[in-house]
Amino acid sequence: MNKIDKIFSKNKNMSLDLYLEKVLYDKNFGYYQKKNPFGSKGDYITAPNISNLFCEMIAIWIVSFWESLKKPKKINFIELGPGNGDFCLSILKALKNFPEAFDAINIFLYEKSEGLKKIQQKRIISKKVSWIQNLKKIKKSPVIFFGNEFLDALPIKQFKKENNNIYERYVALKKNKLKFVFKKAPKKQINKLKNYNLLNKNGIIEYPEYGFKELEIICKKIKKLNGGALFIDYGYNIQRNTNTLQSIIKHRYNDINKNIGDADITALVNFGLYKEYFNHNDLFVENVISQNEFLQKMGILSRFKIVSNKMTNENKSNLYSRLRRLIDPQMMGENFKVIFAKNKKCKFSLAFK
C-alpha cells in the first residue's frame, strides 16, 4: 500500500487542513517525521542556518525582554518547532555572554516530529534545555515563546468565495489521482470567517484553524504568567484572497501533487489575521514589521562590523553575503515579517516602535 492509499484508507476525501496534517505530521509517513529538511543537503535553509548573527540578535532581544520584566529569577524560553537544533545551539552560546540572564533562563523545545527530536537530542547537550510535548505543563515564571518559520508549517483551510457563495476546499482520491474539489462550506465555518472580516472579497481565503488551536494555550500562558510570543515567517499583512500553498524539495519548487510525504508544503502567513487573532485573545500586538527592520533595529549591522573586523577578506565577504540574504528587501528582508504578541501589562516593545 503506497502513501496515498494510506492517507485515504478511511476517507476518500478530506478537508485540506486534515490532508496537510497527515502528509506533514503522520508518525509513519509524514514529511517532518522522517527526514531532516534543513540545510544545503536538505530541502530548504532557514535564518539560523544562514548566520549566527540572526541568533545573536534574538539573544539580545530575549535578554532585553528579561530585563524589562525586572530580571525575574526564572523565565521560560520556549522554541516552537526547533528544526535541526541550529538556533538552540547558537542561542545557548550567545546567552553565555549574559551570565545573569543565562542563569535565569530555562529553554524548552516544543517539537512534534520524533525524527527531528532525535536529531536535536544528539546535538544539544545542555542542562538548560529540555523537551516538552504539552505546553500546559509550564505552570510558573514568565514565558517567551519563539517560532521561526513555525506558523507557515501549520496546516490551513482554504475557502473560495464566489459572489455570495462560500465553498471549502477538500482533497479527494479518484482513480488513484489526487484532486482538489470544493464543497459548500458549513455555516459554522462561514461564521468563523465573518468574525475576522475575511469575506469582503471574492477569491481564495486561507484560514489557519490548526494554527489558532496551537496558539490557544500559548495565549493563555502569556496572560496568566506574563510574557509574550515572537514569530518570524514569510508572509503578508493585507488580505490577498489567493492560493499561497507551495511545495519545495531540494531547494526547488515542487508540484504539490508529487513527492507526497517527501516534499515540504507550506502557505504564506497572513500576519494581519494573526494580529487580529491575538487581539481577540486579549493580547497586545504593537505592529507587524519586516525582518529587515527588526534585525537592523536590533543592531545587526554594528555586530557585523565587530565580528568581521578581524576576518580575512574571503570570510568577511562570506559573512556579508549571509547578512545580505537576511536583510536585503529583494531576499528575506521584506518577504519575512515579525510579530510580537504580549501580555497587555507588558511594556516591552524593543524593535517594534
Image (tube, grey):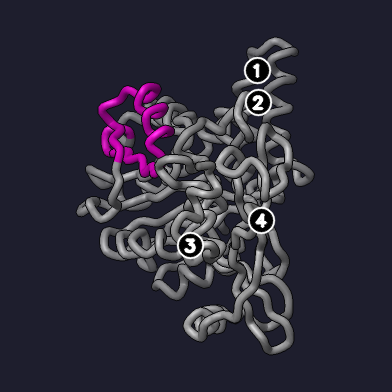
Question: Label 1's element?
Answer: loop
Q: Is residue 164 left or right of residue 271?
A: right
Residue 77 locus on image (x, y percent): 35, 44
Query: How far is mark 3 from mark 1, CA to CA?
Result: 60 Å
Q: Which residues are magenta?
A: 102-131
Query: Residue 88: which quarter of the image?
Result: top left
User: Label 4, on which residue?
Assistant: 245
Q: Alpha carbon of mark 1 to alpha carbon of mark 4: how far?
A: 42 Å
Residue ID for mark 2 = 305
Q: Dot 3 corresponds to which residue?
A: 11
Name which of mark 1 and mark 4 comes first in the sequence. 4
Is 308 part of what is drawn in magenta?
no
Which residue in the protein does label 1 denote?
Answer: 309
- Near mark 2 (Cα within 10 A), the count class, few <14, some 14-19 or many ≥20, is few
Q: Is mark 2 in CB contact (under 8 Å) with mark 3?
A: no
Circle 2 or circle 4, nearest the eye:
4
**How far from the left and from the top, in percent, is residue 65?**
40, 48
Amino acid type at circle 3 is Asn
Q: CA distance from mark 1 to mark 2?
A: 6 Å
Task: Report how far apart the C-alphas of labels 4 and 3 lie in the structure.
Answer: 22 Å
Mark toward the start of the polypeptide (2 vs 4): 4
Q: Residue at x 48, y 62 (%)?
A: 11
Query: Which quadrant, please, contains the C terminus?
Result: bottom right
Residue type marked 1 = Asn
- Residue 105 visible at all: no
Q: Secondary structure at mark 4?
A: loop
Q: Residue at x 73, y 79 (%)?
A: 202
Q: Front-most of 317 and 332?
A: 332
